[in-house]
Amino acid sequence: MRLPFLSGSAVEQALSPERAVEAVRGAFVAYARGEWTMPPKVYVPAHPAGDFRAMPALGGGHALLKWVTSFPGNPELGLPTVMGVVLLSDASNGAPVAVLDAAAVTALRTGAAAVLAAETIGRADAETAAVIGAGVNGRAAARTFAARGRVPWLWDVDERRAGAAAEELGCAVAPSFQQALGADLVATVTPGRDVLFGAGSVRPGQHVSLMGADGPGKAEIAAEELGRVRVFCDDWEQASHNGELAHAVEAGKITRDDVTQLGDVLAGTAAGRQSPDDITIFDSTGLAIQDLAIALAAMERANELDLPTIEL
Ligand SMILES: NC(=O)c1ccc[n+]([C@@H]2O[C@H](COP(=O)([O-])OP(=O)(O)OC[C@H]3O[C@@H](n4cnc5c(N)ncnc54)[C@H](O)[C@@H]3O)[C@@H](O)[C@H]2O)c1
């Protein structure tokens, strides 16, 4: 049996950020309707260096497993934070169908989710956008904002990285950290070691997609802040145990009834933003169904790409 291998550049050639947004939107809706299924991801801690995640999903006639990392100190070692592989299989007979680079799949779907949430529950008249954290997945969020017609400011503690990313993407570095934090739509994509939004800091009307704190012990917003804003998440099971919400749930500041899943808003079964002054936040832990949507969309173009194969 020979399987095609989609490297990072093949995945990027196969689908644009715009196509990724549409694919991820479809995945959230299919999951909300129960058509696609997904057990919560399994974390395999390798602390203090980082952790591994095993992420399975089923939908669209296929099953997927992503084996992926988050090793936040890796950039200092010249290695990416997020690395791994995706295995796509045929759900009618179990046969493996393709192997894909997990970093590229992750970046496309993470950028897509950050922007999809901002567009869905942010203010319709939002003008400014900012991405905080200009690493691999922050750049993907910035690229997706730009592809959807809203060129964001970039901010990073590493000024050189912010400058290089801004040049690569045709964006500007935010004039200050405070101005980046104050944009109408903000996506935070940092390692989650520092709280970016302290208590009382998110202003009326603002939307923040919190992408970085996707595992135990990480936070980009103060737990107190979650008690006074409208909270959305990608998946309650995952987000209440390992995401930003875990701290607020443990502290008794929010319960299941206070949190709306983005897919339910997209499927039309839950309310999104209800007033221009609502403060909305989206807690993303990253879902295997998003990866499945990207893998399936990439495979639609597989015949047009000159892909190497792996013999099993
Ligand atoms: N929610 C999801 O679906 C999802 C998907 C992928 C990655 N992640 C998470 O997002 C985070 C970033 O991933 P990555 O692959 O982009 O990592 P990366 O190492 O490539 O980039 C992280 C960037 O954040 C910057 N940074 C660190 N602290 C900061 C601060 N206080 N303010 C501003 N910038 C700061 C770093 O300088 C770096 O440029 C990780 O925690 C990762 O686990 C989440």
Image: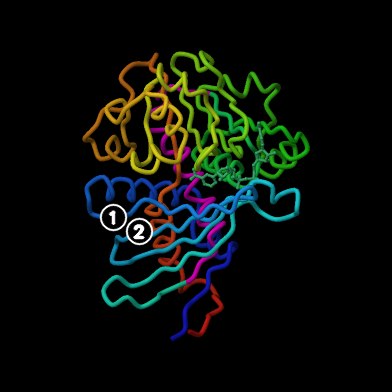
Q: Looking at the image, which residue is at 29% across and 62% down?
A: 60
Relative to the observer, which residue lies in front, 227 or 101? 227
**Residue occupied by mark 2:** 57
Relative to the observer, which residue lies in front, 265 or 281? 281
* 176 sits to left or right of 86: right
Q: In which quarter of the image is residue 131?
A: top right
Residue with the most extreme right position: 160
Residue 44: give x, y in percent of width and height: 50, 55
**Residue occupied by mark 1:** 37
Label 2: element kind: strand
Residue 20: give x, y in percent of width and height: 45, 51
Tell me the amino acid under the disc marked 1. Answer: Thr
How is the structure coloured here? rainbow
Asked whether the residues under the numbered discs 2 and 1 touch, taking CB atoms below 8 Å apart as contact, a structural biologist would say: yes
In this picture, which residue range is highlighted in magenta? 99-127
Q: Looking at the image, which residue is at 32% across and 54% down?
A: 38
- State which quarter of the image contains the N terminus: bottom left
Relative to the observer, which residue lies in front, 144 or 84? 84
Residue 164: give x, y in percent of width and height: 74, 42
Q: Does the residue labelled 1 lie within 8 Å of ligand 1?
A: no
Relative to the observer, which residue lies in front, 139 or 152? 139
Among the two numbered marks 2 and 1 on one chain, the one whose residue lies closer to the N terminus:
1
Q: Looking at the image, which residue is at 42% across and 63% down?
A: 65
Please determine whether, in this image, residue 163 is positioned above or below residue 309: above
